[in-house]
Image (cartoon, rainbow, N blue to C red):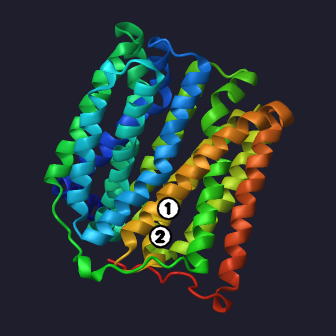
Amino acid sequence: MPSARVEAGVRGLIRDWPRSLFYLAYFSAMGVLVPYWPLYLHLRGFGAQAIGQLMALLALARVGAPYVGGFLVDHAGHRVAVVRISAFLAFAIFTTAPWAQGFAAEAVVMMGFSFFWYATLPSLEASTLAAHGTHYGRVRLWGSIGFIVMVAALGPVLGHHGVALIVPVLAVLLCALWLATLAVPRIEGPAHETRPLVLKPGLVVFLLACFLMQVSYGPYYTFYTLYLERFGYGTLEIGLLWAFAVACEVLLFWQADRLFARFREQTLFAATLALAFVRWILIALCARNVGFVITAQLLHAFTFGLYHAAAVRLAGHYAGPGSRARAQALYGSAAGAGAGIGALWSGYAWSDWGPRGMFLAAAAVAGAACLMVGVMWFWRNRLTGGPPVAAERR
């Protein structure tokens, strides 16, 4: 019965409120950091070039930090303890931000807190997957809710109270993140079960596909707002389109277990890459038609929500017991590297190929990822370490 499913899902969320709170705090902090932190750096007197360099440090931390955290989890077997320590250090280092004077000091603070902040996520992801399996999305959706609420609500607040408010808001969110980890139940894996993480061909192709997917997202995260403005969309319309996309993502996370109950993870993963190709084509060629733009935003549910839900499951299946946290970390590092390069190349593409050419290039990148995955899984019997087995159904 649908009502019984909803009731069971709500009970599950209530029972695991610590992980839900973790995702809420983590992605709420991202909703502050990504769009608004450059405003704070400008307030501190940094110029455009310095702000760009400091923001690049965040992407750099995202590449290395997840794997370090994942390695410690797999080696020590205490995944929640690693998350708690990392969350506390992220909060403690960030509290020094108001006293950081000059570029070097600001860089140390940003690299320090972001390194430990990013290190918390892969281990918590592995813990959530172990605890909830196919119901992972119903816990993870709180991260999407936190992001969209913070992005939408903080702008007017900063306009009224000043940009300096960013620091105490982020401090409160990082403190909430740490407090949430204290209540997360322990799910330990004995250290003697640690196994080497073997980079089989299937895992390598999967990570490369994740990297390319994030590269294709570079134009969207960097220039989508400016792109829509060129076609006459106002700030209110653009904000609603962003909010609609994340709302669709939240609904997908809530219902993701139904899709995983019917289809294999690798099938859904490949489908999200194909839909990303379609989405960037729609944005490139049909931006004047609001119906097509809304359709493109609707696809965010699949190209982000379903993509991420499938990817975190596939990373664990490719790795096997004893190295799953490191596999989650490798996935996070591949995504971080792709996001950084995507943001970098999109700036050159906008100048050299024009806005539409930039999104067509993004479609080509997503299409290449889909083709690569399709070929790999078509010939899986000829590759060592073929596709992962389907997840156990609950």
Quick one: SS at disc 2? helix
The location of residue 247, given as percent across then percent down, is: 46, 42
- Distance between the Cα atoms at labels 1 and 2? 7 Å
Tell me: residue 390, above or below residue 315.
below
The location of residue 269, given as percent across then percent down, is: 57, 67
Specify few, some or many for label 1: CA neighbours under 10 Å numbering under 14, 14-19, or 20 or more. many
With 362 as the anchor, is 68 left or right in this view? left
The location of residue 158, given as percent across then percent down, is: 39, 14
Which residue is painted at 70% across and 86% down in the image?
379
Which residue lies under the disc numbered 1? Answer: 331
With 222 as the anchor, is 2 left or right in this view? left
Which residue lies under the disc numbered 2? Answer: 315
Specify few, some or many for label 2: CA neighbours under 10 Å numbering under 14, 14-19, or 20 or more. many
Q: Indicate the quadrant where residue 176 lies.
A: top left
Q: Earlier in the sequence, mark 1 or mark 2?
A: 2
| Furthest-front residue in this view | 104
Residue type highlighted by circle 1: Tyr
